[in-house]
Image (tube, grey):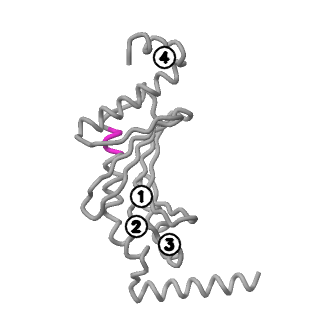
Amino acid sequence: MTEAMKTMEEKILTPEVQGRHLVAKKVQALLESNGWKYDKHEGKENKLVMPFRLTNLTAIVIVTISEEVDAISVKVLMPEECDEKFFLAINDYFARTNYSLRYGAFHIDHDDGELSYRYATQCTMETFDKETIDDYIRICMNTVDKHYPVIERLATGQLTSDEKKRYLIQSKMLVIGVREE
């Protein structure tokens, strides 16, 4: 970017927006300092998209710097989609697991079965801390990596006999409950 364009950008952008751009640049520098390759998608939100090889899967990690709410979010997309027949099993596992998590939560998109883990935190230029953001990104990736073998098994219907019994009983109880209403 030429000096004239930089000066014009500084005049057009409000101080808040300039601060958000600086946060995005700091996050990019953090990713680069870790040797992580990313694709940058700019718009209302700056998205930094990284394919990432973990121990149990290759995931897509998306770090989003939101200009509207001064936040950074991390979303880890899992490669496996959940078959609709197994939504009950995966929802049960996510509910039980999310309850014990300190950061973030597992999600399922009920329209297409997409499985993800998400975490968001407030962040401005004044509150940005490189080590903390680095920790958040790593925690998200490690949490998915730790739980993925079970998630993959449930999402593809490879249930144990005890799980099959539990979900059949839960389904029957739901049917009975719906009929009583």
Name which residue type carries label 3: Asp
CA–CA distance in space, label 4 to label 1:
42 Å
Disc 2 designates what residue?
80
Q: Secondary structure at mark 3?
A: helix
Image location of residue 69, percent across then percent down = 55, 35
Q: Residue at x 38, y 19 (%)?
A: 1
- Report the side of 148 relative to 81 (left or right): left
Disc 1 designates what residue?
101
State which tag comes first along the sequence, 3 or 1. Answer: 3
Report the front residue among 103 and 36.
36
Q: Nearer the viewer, mark 3 or mark 2?
A: 2
CA–CA distance in space, label 1 to label 2:
21 Å
In the rendered view, would you say 134 is above or below 181?
above
Disc 3 designates what residue?
92
Question: Magenta span has 141?
Answer: no
Name which residue type carries label 1: Leu
State which tag comes first along the sequence, 1 or 2. Answer: 2
Q: Which residues are magenta?
A: 132-136
